[in-house]
Amino acid sequence: MGLGLYSWRVEPHWLEITKRTLPIADLPHSLAGATLAHLSDLHVGPRVANDYLTSTLKTVQGLKPDIVAYTGDFITNGEPAYFDQLSEVMKYTPLGRLATIAALGNHDYGQGWSHPEVGDEVKKRLTSRGIQVLCNQRCFVSGLQVVGLDDLWGPRFSPLRIMSKIETKAPTLVLCHNPDVADLPVWLEFKGWILSGHTHGGQCKPPFLPPPVLPVRNKRYTAGDFDLGDGRWLYISRGVGHLLPVRFNVRPEVTLFTLVKA
């Protein structure tokens, strides 16, 4: 009884601010020591309380990050009924001093992840709050190249369109919702960090055991950092929101990275 109440009423809203360094090769001197707040999987909709989400966004505001990066699933199932709810929540968007950037997730493309017009509306709502949404695109933030890949399961997944155009010698960070993309032959000469979400860390995990349910092909990809062995590193956020309102041993998180030279 007590464990069930904890998993349902306490842990899904017990946000953890995870602090760690993010070493980037050839990082510009001006960005050394800068902070980057990574948020993923807000899942605005009927299952995640608005007050919890707005409280989380206000908490990130208080961290005063230099860069804010989102890795998708802003809403659940792309339901049009949630667009106005998204706009209401994102009134509290934490804006980075230098940039606020996002990539979209599968839920941002509606039922069956197959509705580009839903993704367009999500992008429009986010852009109105000062978030730059990258869909197979890149931007530069004080000399740091940031690439946003569209979602693996979505209708616009086309990573080679942008990965073939990036400056391979520039310090680079990639935002990519689904970590399974890390195993696909789309990275060409890229070396560096990929920030992802999507898994929610499994939401429930027995102590000392892997989570029994993960929405990825590579069951190694749970949460945290992974050395991909070829000069690429992957960080998977446990996410802010949830699909089912239950978490156990997998607290929701926002990660605050401090950028350092590799």
Image (tube, rainbow, N blue to C red):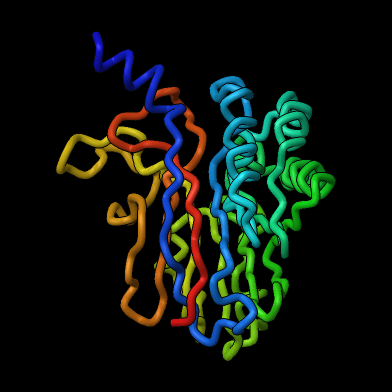
Vertical arrangement, residue 125 with respect to residue 153, above or below: above
Q: Measured from the top left, where is residue 3 in percent x and y?
A: 25, 17
Which of the image's four quarters has the C terminus? bottom left
Q: Measured from the top left, where is residue 189 in percent x and y?
A: 50, 86
Closest to the observer, 166 or 249: 249
Q: Measured from the top left, where is residue 89 in percent x and y?
A: 70, 31
- In the picture, measured across the screen, residue 145 lies left or right of residue 199, that is right
Name the residue at 64% across, 79% down: 30
Q: Residue furthest left?
A: 208
Name the residue at 58% across, 22% down: 49
Which of the image's four quarters has the N terminus? top left
Name the residue at 78% across, 28% down: 84
- In the picture, measured across the screen, residue 226 lies left or right of residue 192, that is left
Vertical arrangement, residue 218 with respect to residue 183, above or below: above
Q: Measured from the top left, where is residue 66 in percent x and y?
A: 65, 61
Q: Residue furthest bottom?
A: 169
